[in-house]
Image (cartoon, rainbow, N blue to C red):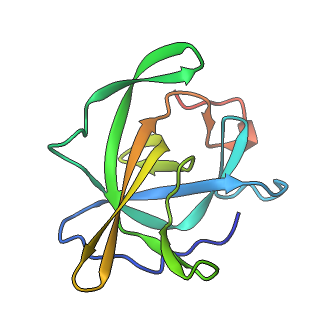
Amino acid sequence: MQNIRIEKRVPFGFRGEWGKLYKLYTSDVTDKNGLIKYSEAYYREIGQDVQFKFVENEIDKRKFPYAEVENLITCGEYRVVDSTDAYFDTDKRRFHSVVGVGDVVYLAGDWWTVDKEEERNIYTPLPQTFYRFGLKIIKKGLTTDLSEENDDVT
C-alpha cells in the first residue's frame, strides 16, 4: 500500500459526513493498529478522515439487489456519495481520488465497500473534480478487533 495523503479538497459549500478510509494492505501483518480484515484480506486506515456527501434526491437510500456470493442474490443497502478529496500522482502528473474501487469505508456508523467510481469536472476556469462512489453495505465478514479474529460485524 502506498502512502496516500489528501492534498486537495474542493470546498463543497455544504456539510459532508466524515468517514474513515481503509486501503488494501499487502505487507506482512506485524502491527495490527489501524487494521481491519475483510474478505480474507487486511486493510489499513489511511490516517486522515475523508469527506463524503450523501447524494440525496437521486438514487441514494434505495435498496438494490446485488450478488454477495456468486448466484446468490440478496437485498442490501446501496448508497451513493460524492467526495472531492484527492492526492497528486507524480508519475501521471494529475490528481486522483483517495477513494478507489475495492476500498473499505466506515461512514455514518456502518461499514461499506466501494463498488463503483465516476469522475466529473467543473471548470471555473480551472478544473475542479468531483468523484461519485457507489457504496455497498458490509453485513458480515468484517473483523475490526484483530486480537480476536473470530468476531465478525453483524
Q: Is residue 131 visible?
A: yes
Residue 103, position as x, y percentages in the image: 56, 50
Q: Residue at x 50, y 33 (%)?
A: 138
The quadrant in which residue 57 appears is top left
What is the quadrant of the N terminus in the image? bottom right
Q: Nearer the viewer, residue 46 or 98?
A: 98
Q: Is residue 151 above or below residue 146?
A: above
Q: Residue furthest top?
A: 72
User: Horizontally, is 71 left or right of 44 in the view?
Assistant: left
Instruction: List x then y, in percent, for residue 144.
Output: 61, 43
Residue at 41% of width from left, 69% of height from top? 85
The structure residue drawn at horizontal position 32% and vertical position 45%, both measured from the top left corner, is 80
Which of 22/130 is in front? 130
Question: From what the image shows, is residue 83 above or below residue 93?
Answer: above
Question: Residue, x 55% and y 75% (percent of image)?
Answer: 5
- 40 relative to 116, above or below: above
Image location of residue 113, percent across then percent down? 50, 42
The answer to whether residue 90 is above or below residue 75 is below
